[in-house]
Image (cartoon, rainbow, N blue to C red):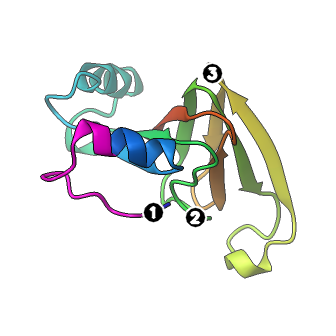
């Protein structure tokens, strides 16, 4: 589900019910978040601090949830599967072309602890485990 929740009116119980019903929450890591120190350590290790640093999001998804439909990012992305598993489809031909021109897709299953690198401009999408929720983090590289 890609319904938008009103953060000012959504309770923890509402969010839990939404995710259990197949929804996804995309949580950007921003200053003040408990993961922001980790983001800054990654930035420092890559030598890309400040406004030219990485971006980081955490995706918490319910059973069979698709947080984002097939898309590509304008920067390379590292995916870290934190909990559960997700099935990914990743473009495997016709790079730089319209999504409708892609004829070959690679299927990849990530489980907790797995890393995946997706180059800039490569179409992809992920679907959560049909029986359980899952969580992954993405690190957008500059």
Q: Where is residue 100 drawn, in percent x and y?
A: 74, 80
Instruction: Measure the C-alpha gap from mark 3 to mark 1.
Output: 24 Å
**Is 6 covered by the magenta stretch?**
yes
Q: Residue at x 58, y 54 (%)?
A: 66
Camera sees residue 55? no
Q: Is residue 20 left or right of residue 95?
A: left
Q: Residue at x 28, y 57 (%)?
A: 5
Q: Where is residue 28 drawn, in percent x and y?
A: 30, 43
Question: 130 or 52, which is in the foreground?
Answer: 130
Along the polypeptide, which appears first: circle 3 or circle 1?
Answer: 1
Q: Residue at x 38, y 38 (%)?
A: 16
Q: CB atoms at circles 3 and 1 under 8 Å apart?
A: no
Q: CB atoms at circles 1 and 2 under 8 Å apart?
A: yes
Secondary structure of the residue carrying tag 3 is: loop
| Vertical relation: 44 (above or below) 71 | above
Along the polypeptide, which appears first: circle 1 or circle 2?
Answer: 1
According to the picture, the residue beneath numbered tag 1 turns out to be: 2
The answer to which quarter of the image holds residue 59 is: top left
Along the polypeptide, which appears first: circle 2 or circle 3?
Answer: 2
Crowdedness near tag 2: few (<14), some (14–19) or many (≥20) residues, C-alpha within 10 Å: few
The answer to which quarter of the image holds residue 120 is: bottom right
According to the picture, the residue beneath numbered tag 2 turns out to be: 69
Q: Where is residue 35 drawn, in percent x and y?
A: 29, 24
* Magenta segment, prevailing SS (helix, strand or loop): loop
Secondary structure of the residue carrying tag 2 is: loop
According to the picture, the residue beneath numbered tag 3 turns out to be: 112
Q: Is residue 76 left or right of residue 91?
A: left
- Between disc 3 and disc 1, the foreground one is 1
Write down the region rendered in magenta: 2-14
């Amino acid at each position: 589900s890609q319904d938008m929740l009103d953060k000012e009116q959504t309770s923890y119980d509402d969010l839990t019910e939404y995710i259990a019903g197949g929804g996804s929450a995309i949580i950007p890591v921003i200053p003040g978040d408990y993961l922001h120190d980790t983001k800054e350590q990654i930035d420092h290790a890559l030598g890309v601090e400040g406004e030219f640093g990485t971006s980081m999001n955490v995706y918490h998804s319910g059973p069979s949830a698709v947080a984002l439909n097939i898309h590509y990012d304008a920067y390379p992305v590292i995916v870290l599967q934190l909990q559960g598993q997700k099935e990914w489809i990743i473009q495997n031909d016709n790079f730089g072309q319209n999504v409708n021109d892609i004829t070959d897709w690679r299927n990849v299953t990530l489980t907790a602890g797995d890393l995946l690198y997706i180059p800039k401009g490569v179409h992809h999408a992920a679907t959560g485990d049909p029986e359980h929720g899952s969580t992954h983090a993405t690190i957008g590289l500059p």
